[in-house]
Image: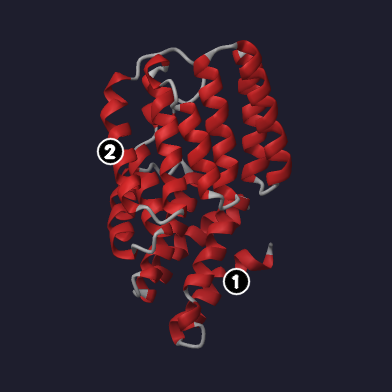
Amino acid sequence: MRAASTYAALVGWLYQDAGDLGTAGFWRGVTQEIAVRSRDPHLIGYSLVNQAQVRTDLGDGHGVIDLCEAALDDADRLFPKVRIMAMQQQAPGASLTGDRDAVDRLIDTAGGLLPRVDDDLPWGNACRRTPGYLEVQRATCYGRLGLGREADRLWSQVLAAVPSTARRDRGVYLARHATAAAVSRDPDHAVEIAREAATIAVETRSVRMLRELGALERAMRPWHDAPVGRDLAEVLGPVNEGS
């Protein structure tokens, strides 16, 4: 059952990364069906977090919160890793509803569980191998909440620890960092950060990255007719030509 659910979840993630949320939702549903039939509480929690990821991309904050709270209903039975996954996914749901206090509480609580992760589950191991795993979520949430300066500082810390080999993740984080700089009304800084993100986007053609660069363009609209706005258009030109 675990192998089948892992495969279905991976397929769902690939469709989600490509921006096909309808097909992603179908495969997330397959993951959940397998999990429920298995009666494995860890697998059921994992499947609910998978569903919450799709709801996050759809902008449905309350749906994210409901799914993650359902995953945590019997938290004492769950491995720490599953609880961390649910809380770090609930945080974006809280950010979508404008609740900064909940964002910080969820991420701080999840951080306290990190030293206790010692299971052999084949999925959800990003918390062990991804630098700044939880701070990535906090920075993303701060950006969504319009806390540009706080997000800018966090992204600088996170990106310092992300290896250059993690190209897709680095590109997404850079695009979010640039957007945070724009939100904090530092457009020149935003364009400078966007240069590396645009180079990675051209190389990888990651739909997720292109989506984040689209958010940057929207955040930079106040400077559309200014020299810095034209600089951004030049930086993103090769990206938009291939879209």
Q: Residue at x 65, y 38 (%)?
A: 14
192 relative to 81, above or below? below
Between discs 1 and 2, the one toward the N terminus: 2
Q: How many marks?
A: 2
Residue under numbered circle 1: 237
Q: Residue at x 63, y 20 (%)?
A: 5
Rate crowding at label 2 as few (under 14), some (14 to 19) or many (20 or more) other CA atoms within 10 Å: some
Q: Residue at x 32, y 60 (%)?
A: 152
Instruction: Determine whether the residue tagged by mark 2 lies in a helix, strand or loop.
Output: helix
Tell me residue 188's x, y (percent): 37, 75
- Distance between mark 1 and mark 2 Cα atoms: 39 Å
Instruction: Determine whether the residue tagged by mark 1 lies in a helix, strand or loop.
Output: helix
58 relative to 73, above or below? below
Amino acid type of disc 1? Gly
Q: Nearer the viewer, residue 109 or 1?
A: 109
- Left or right relative to 52: residue 14: right
Quick one: quadrant of the N terminus?
Answer: top right
Tell me residue 109's x, y (percent): 29, 34
221 relative to 12, above or below? below
Tell me residue 37's x, y (percent): 66, 14
Residue 108: which disc?
2
Q: Residue at x 39, y 59 (%)?
A: 145
Q: Nearer the viewer, mark 1 or mark 2?
A: 2
Q: Is residue 91 visible?
A: yes
Q: How is the image coloured?
A: secondary structure
* Quadrant of residue 241 within the rendered picture: bottom right
Tell me residue 144's x, y (percent): 43, 58
- Left or right relative to 1: residue 52: left
Q: Nearer the viewer, residue 123 or 107?
A: 107
Quick one: quadrant of the C terminus?
Answer: bottom right
Amino acid type of disc 2? Asp
Q: Nearer the viewer, residue 190 or 149?
A: 149
